Amino acid sequence: MISKNTVCIWYDHGAEEAARFYAQTFPDTTVGAVHIAPSDFPSGKKGDVLTVEFSVCGVPCVGLNGGDAFKQSEAFSFQIATDDQAETDRYWNAIVGNGGEESMCGWCRDKWGVSWQITPRVLTEAMAKGGDVAKRAFEAMMEMQKIDVAKIEAAVRG
C-alpha cells in the first residue's frame, strides 16, 4: 500500500545503492520496489533504475535517479535521534566512512549528497529546557562537528 505522504529524494544516480546502504545502517529501514525505466529519459536509458521505494527509520521515501539537474542541500536532511555516544558514533562513522563528509553541529553528508543530522537526545532535551541550560548546550554544540555527548552533558550541568 502506498503511503499518503512519501519523501521523494532526487539522486544524480545511485538511488538503489543509497537505499541499500541506509537499510544496512539504520533500524526500521527497508528497501522495497525497484522500478526500471520503461524507455529512455533525460538522465538515463530504458532498463536503468528510475525509482526505488524505501524507508528510513520508518519514514517512507522514494529515490529518483533524476540526473544532475538539481543538487542536494542542507535545506533537506534526515534527523536521526540517538540515545548515547556509541549510537551517535555508529551512524556518523557509517555515513562519513562511506564516502561522506563531516559538517558542523551534528550534520554530515552522505556520498550521494543527502544531509543527515545525527542528534543525541541529550542535546534535544537540553534545548527543550530553554534558559541557561539550552544556552550552554547550544554554545557547546556550536564548537562540534560530531556531537560529543559527554561535553553536552557537562554543559547541561554547568
Image (cartoon, rainbow, N blue to C red):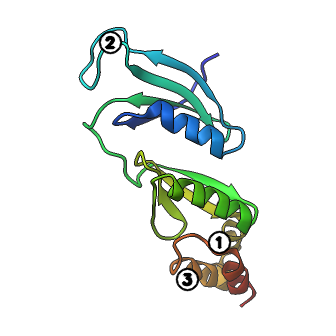
Kindly indicate the quadrant of the structure image that contains residue 46: top left
Q: Which of marks 1 and 3 precedes in the sequence?
A: 1
Q: Quadrant of the N terminus?
A: top right
| SS at mark 2 in the image | loop
Task: Quote the CA–CA distance across marks 2 and 3.
Answer: 52 Å
Query: Which residue has dot 1 on it?
Result: 127
Q: Amino acid at mark 3?
A: Glu
Who is closer to the viewer here, 146 or 156?
Answer: 146
Task: Quote the CA–CA distance across marks 2 and 1.
Answer: 49 Å
Badge 3 crowding class, 10 Å Cα cut-off, few under 14, some 14 to 19, many 20 or more, is few
Q: Nearer the viewer, mark 3 or mark 1?
A: 3
Q: Nearer the viewer, mark 2 or mark 1?
A: 2
- Checking the image for residue 46, the label placed there is 2
Question: What residue lies at 55% left-to-right and 83% top-to-bottom?
Answer: 139
Q: Amino acid at mark 1?
A: Met
Kindly indicate the quadrant of the structure image that contains residue 40: top left
Q: Which of marks 1 and 2 precedes in the sequence?
A: 2
Question: What residue lies at 52% left-to-right and 70% top-to-bottom?
Answer: 105
| SS at mark 3 in the image | helix
Labels 3 & 1 near each other (Cβ < 8 A): no
Question: What residue lies at 47% left-to-right and 70% top-to-bottom?
Answer: 104
- Checking the image for residue 139, the label placed there is 3
Is residue 91 shown above or below 21?
below
Q: Which of marks 3 and 2 precedes in the sequence?
A: 2
Q: Quadrant of the C terminus?
A: bottom right
Residue 103, percent from left and from top: 45, 66
Q: Amino acid at mark 2?
A: Lys
Badge 2 crowding class, 10 Å Cα cut-off, few under 14, some 14 to 19, many 20 or more, is few
Task: Quote the CA–CA distance across marks 3 and 1.
Answer: 11 Å
